[in-house]
């Protein structure tokens, strides 16, 4: 992979590691529908005008069935499933289950997209090393406790959605400008969540949300929705949809590092040992052999 690809990979990891911190802050003041609606609305307000100016919205509208499929599989379903499941299971377990996305992504790339390079031994070794690193990062202790199987199923479905959506985009939307696809996708999600969000928002505003909550919504919209998805599509073009799902690994690492810096969370043995494994595993799995 090119140097540009590696830069994209770790930049996206940061952009999608930030939400763990921002969601924790925004969730104190706003409901799940409000958070999702706000972030996608902000992202759409940024990207749709750019798409119109570049002439990228019209091709996306022509491909609307596949854009709708991408939006549903990548955003509408997984964002709700993950948010609701995290209310009932340990955060470590949720993080570990979402880190299975690259495994599903590689299987989809190998069996359905004909990308035989993902079956190379070095790629598989890198995938395994990275996954072990994620397990160490989240910590075995954080995975203990009882939980209902339904929430585990919700996390599995969310991970599957995150793995399938890039493959759909790579196969069916390859010739459609990225900014048009993402701008239209975010608009679709905004329409889907508009009614429940706007119903809850007056009461949430009356309760007096903190400025940190508003800023978190802004960050989720600008960084984690608009910017991150545009970069992710560029990464898919660079390395394919299977390898692109590996951004899930540095997501976890960035989230923990941000927790140490901003939330004063402790530096653990798992972090010290897991972070290098995530970096090494990602490097090996990303290389085309």
Image (cartoon, rainbow, N blue to C red):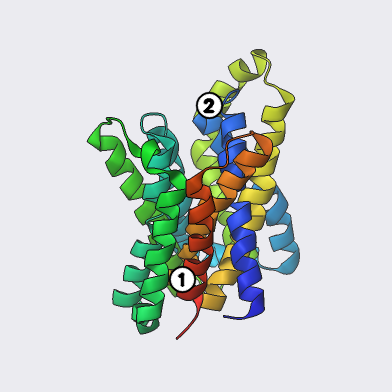
Q: Which label belongs to residue 243?
A: 1
Spot occupied by residue 258 in the image (x, y as percentages of width and height): 63, 44
Spot occupied by residue 11 in the image (x, y as percentages of width and height): 65, 61
Spot occupied by residue 63 in the image (x, y as percentages of width and height): 50, 66
Q: Residue furthest top?
A: 207
Q: Residue at x 45, y 73 (%)?
A: 285
Q: Residue furthest bottom?
A: 289
Residue holding disc 2: 31
Q: Is residue 288 left or right of residue 255?
A: left
Which SS class for mark 1? helix
Which SS class for mark 2? loop
The quadrant the C terminus occupies is bottom left
Identify which residue, 44 or 282, lies in the foreground.
282
Q: Residue at x 67, y 28 (%)?
A: 213
Q: Is residue 147 above or below residue 226?
A: above
Q: Is residue 61 left or right of residue 99?
A: right
Q: Is residue 20 above or below residue 14?
A: above
Q: Residue at x 58, y 24 (%)?
A: 28
Identify which residue, 45 or 165, lies in the foreground.
165
Q: Is residue 19 above or below residue 166?
A: above
Categorize mark 2 by other alpha carbons within 10 Å: few (<14), some (14-19), many (20+). Answer: some
Residue 76 visible here = no
Categorize mark 1 by other alpha carbons within 10 Å: few (<14), some (14-19), many (20+). Answer: many
């Amino acid at each position: 992979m090119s140097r540009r690809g590696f830069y994209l990979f770790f930049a996206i990891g940061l952009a999608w590691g930030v939400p763990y911190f921002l969601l924790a802050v925004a969730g104190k003041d706003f409901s799940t529908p409000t958070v999702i609606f706000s972030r996608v609305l902000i992202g759409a307000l940024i990207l749709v005008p750019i798409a119109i100016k570049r002439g990228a919205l019209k091709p996306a509208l022509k491909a609307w069935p596949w854009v709708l499929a991408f939006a549903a599989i990548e955003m509408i379903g997984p964002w709700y499933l993950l948010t609701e499941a995290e209310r009932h299971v340990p955060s470590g377990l949720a993080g570990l289950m979402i880190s299975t996305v690259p495994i599903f992504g590689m299987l989809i790339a190998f069996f359905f997209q004909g990308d035989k390079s993902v079956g190379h031994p070095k790629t598989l070794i890198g995938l395994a090393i990275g996954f072990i690193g994620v397990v160490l990062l989240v910590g075995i202790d954080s995975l203990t406790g009882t939980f209902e199987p339904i929430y585990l199923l919700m996390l599995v479905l969310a991970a599957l959605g995150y793995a399938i959506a890039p493959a759909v985009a790579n196969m069916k939307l390859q010739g459609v400008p990225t900014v048009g696809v993402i701008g239209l996708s975010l608009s679709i999600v905004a329409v889907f969540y508009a009614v429940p969000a706007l119903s809850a928002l007056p009461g949430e505003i009356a309760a007096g949300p903190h400025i940190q909550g508003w800023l978190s919504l802004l960050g989720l919209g600008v960084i984690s929705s608009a910017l991150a998805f545009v970069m992710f599509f560029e990464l898919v073009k660079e390395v394919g949809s299977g390898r692109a799902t590996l951004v899930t690994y540095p997501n976890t690492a960035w989230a923990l590092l941000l927790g140490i810096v901003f939330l004063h969370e402790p530096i653990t043995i798992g972090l010290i040992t897991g972070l290098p494994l995530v970096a090494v595993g990602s490097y090996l799995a990303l290389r085309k052999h």
